[in-house]
Amino acid sequence: MTRSGAAGAPWWRGAVIYQIYVRSFADSDGDGVGDLAGIRSRLPYARELGVDAIWLNPFYPSPQADAGYDVTDHREVDPVLGSLDDLDALVRDAHASGLRVLIDLVPNHTSSEHAWFRAALAAAPGGPERARYLFREGRGPGGDRPPNDWGSNFGGRAWTRVTEPDGTPGQWYLHLFAPEQPDLDWTNGEVRAEFDSILRFWLDRGVDGFRIDVAHGLAKDPEMRDLAGNFAHSEPAAEGHPHWDRDEVHDVYRGWRRVSDAYPGERTFVAEVWVQDPERLALYLRPDELHTAFSFGLLLAPWDAAPMRTAIDTSIGALAEVGASPTWVLSNHDVVRHVTRYGGGELGRDRARAAALLMLALPGGAYVYQGEELGLPEVTELPDGVRRDPAFLRTGGADRGRDGCRVPMPWSGPRPPFGFGPSGESWLPQPEDWVELTVEQQAADPSSTLALYRDALALRRELPALGDGQQAWMEAGPDLLAFRREPGFVCVVNFGDEPAELARELLPDGARVVLASRPVAPGGRIPGATAVWYARD
């Protein structure tokens, strides 16, 4: 029986995948930066947690203008993080322990230090070197204004003017993110062929799939029309947007699917797609395109029963039209950790524990971001001088950026860096009070958040109702979300602050509490901010 709940179903339909932010997971050499060897040494932890696979954030050579998402070589490993031999050993050990490995793919842009872009800057306008990117003439007298009004996701405009080889002001290039991340032109055949080759390079090395960064961003309106106040540049894409979620992008993914299908072992893609309409998300998951995409509905919903139910229904309903399964997520490396989003402190942690049981009981797969299994909060008090996120730097601190969710993992010991590496260094500082949240502390506590995740993932393997499949809502009260999954499983979440009664007739005959995010007396009321799993023996 696979985790998907159906014999012979693809593994990814019901998989739980653990996201590893490489620089912040485990440091093997004492330089204060996590690395591939560090991850390899901690594979037993991921296996004991009970996940099916790991996803690695970018480990490619990079000047680190955007935490490795500015790539100079898509077929290498940054020396700070290891080597290709380290990557091969990590994949080999992961497979030996029953874990699959997904890696990040960054196709929307390269680093401005990439050999292609350096060649583009050295070439004359109109040459083939510039055709790989989106260079355009400026507007106004002398071309001194950008080609349109598009803005960068990190603040400021999305265009930078270059100085031509002869020293004169020249063309402008598009960067929807930092200026150090020039966008590629996906109408260019050389770009498409290069990424087909990159896919094969990593598939040949044994990786099991790819997370696609900014999957909705590759195609741009060839007329480069202004946003003109009709669209936002940094929000989930509305239909008709000139540079997000354009129909032309789907041809790229049909080609990639043909590449992955030529390899054995159910290689898979998961797409980062930010769109306003779940039906638009479903288009990426048609049978000849990508396998999965993050269902961000839970992540975006507030702690309230009605919007949570709406988010679940819209995601499941839209994907059912194309036969795809949802892939749920509560936190990742780009958003405030959900303990903090849900109010912080003890209340936020209680709600986060309940949300975890909700997510892991829903049909489909799920991603767990490193540290959420420890109940880590967002680190909101980082000194400005240590922050690295370009969103913080380009807005002068108005946008606090994403560094607070990327602080290194606390493993053991009484003080920072809590066993992160063999030295006393970590590239971002950890709070002193994380001493109560280390893996070492929680592994010895059966009531800890780590124990809750381990128990939930073990039950998810054991109970045939969980993973991919169907669910049916039960009407249980205004603050309660309750649903049944067959055979004989019920999940109930109390979103209210006060204890609530669950009608016994809603439970299958012989059902008992098998897991709860907070203590629940047998046959008793469900406390506020609590999720309970019931199942038959």
Image (tube, grey):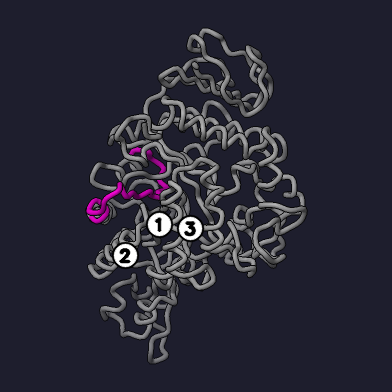
Q: CA distance from mark 3 to mark 2?
A: 17 Å
Residue highlighted by disc 1: 227
Q: Does residue 382 appear left or right of residue 194 in this picture?
A: right
Residue 181 lies, in percent from the top left, at: 44, 69
Q: Decide whether residue 170 is among the magenta residues.
A: no
The alpha-carbon separation of the residues under discs 3 and 1 comes to: 31 Å
**What residue do we see at 64% from left, 66% from top?**
32
- List x then y, in percent, for residue 74: 38, 68
Mark 2 or 1: in front is 2
- The magenta segment is 259-279
Q: Quick one: SS at disc 1?
A: loop
Residue density around tag 3, few if under 14, some if 14–19, many if 20 or more, within 10 Å: many
Q: Is residue 315 visible?
A: no
Residue 416 seen from this side = yes
In primary-sequence order, the first of circles 2 and 1 is: 2
Q: Secondary structure at mark 3?
A: loop
Query: Is 50 placed left or right of 209 in the picture?
Result: right
| Residue 268 is covered by the magenta coloring | yes
Image quadrant where one finds the N terminus:
top left
Would you name the residue on which mark 3 appears? Answer: 57
In the image, what residue type sits under mark 2?
Phe
**Residue 230 image point, x, y percent:** 41, 51
The amino acid pointed to by label 1 is Leu
- The mark lying in front, picked from 3 and 1, is 3
SS at circle 2: helix
In this view, the mark in front (3 or 2): 2
Q: Amino acid at mark 3?
A: Asn
- Residue occupied by mark 2: 201
